[in-house]
Image (spheres, rainbow, N blue to C red):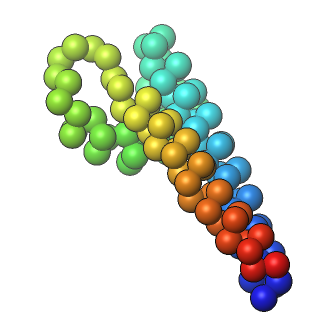
Amino acid sequence: MFLIGNLLGAVATLLDYILYLYMFVVIARAVISWVSPDPYNPIVQFLNRITEPVLEPIRRRLPIGGYGIDFSPLIVIFAIYFLQRFLVQSLRDTALWLR
């Protein structure tokens, strides 16, 4: 059983790092959007490709229309924080219980 516990611990750590990295990508996208970036810049294109599949469905469902403030990155950051505190911590606790 300790092998499964170690595997769950490794998965929890990897998931935590991935979520943390994605949170910084979302923050970078939000900060870059403030300065009217060049849409042909490869960094801007990369950030748009990585974040748009997550941000666009949230934008469609937000009841805020035409105010010029995009709250979708904030909602994604809260969701990532929730996943880190709930899912990752649950995986870690389960891994410790299996050891």
- Residue located 63% across and 58% down the image: 88
Q: In the rendered view, tell whether residue 2 sits above or below residue 66.
A: below
Q: Is residue 38 visible?
A: no
Q: Is residue 2 left or right of residue 47?
A: right
Q: Relative to the observer, which residue lies in front, 3 or 65? A: 3
| Image x and y of residue 32, in percent | 52, 20
Q: Is residue 91 left or right of residue 38?
A: right
- Residue located 56% across and 59% down the image: 87
Q: Residue furthest bottom?
A: 1
- Residue located 65% across and 57% down the image: 89
| Image x and y of residue 27, in percent | 55, 28
Q: Is residue 68 visible?
A: yes
Q: In the rendered view, tell whether residue 5 sits above or below residue 27.
A: below
Q: Is residue 31 left or right of residue 4?
A: left
Q: Relative to the observer, which residue lies in front, 59 or 46? A: 59
Q: In the rendered view, tell whether residue 76 sits above or below residue 27.
A: below
Q: Is residue 57 left or right of residue 2?
A: left
- Snapshot quadrant of residue 65: top left
Image quadrant containing the C terminus: bottom right
Image quadrant containing the N terminus: bottom right
- Residue located 55% across and 54% down the image: 86
| Image x and y of residue 78, in percent | 47, 37
- Snapshot quadrant of residue 23: top right
Q: Relative to the observer, which residue lies in front, 5 or 14? A: 5
Q: Relative to the observer, which residue lies in front, 8 or 21? A: 8
Q: In the rendered view, tell whether residue 92 sits above or below residue 74.
A: below
Q: Residue furthest top?
A: 35
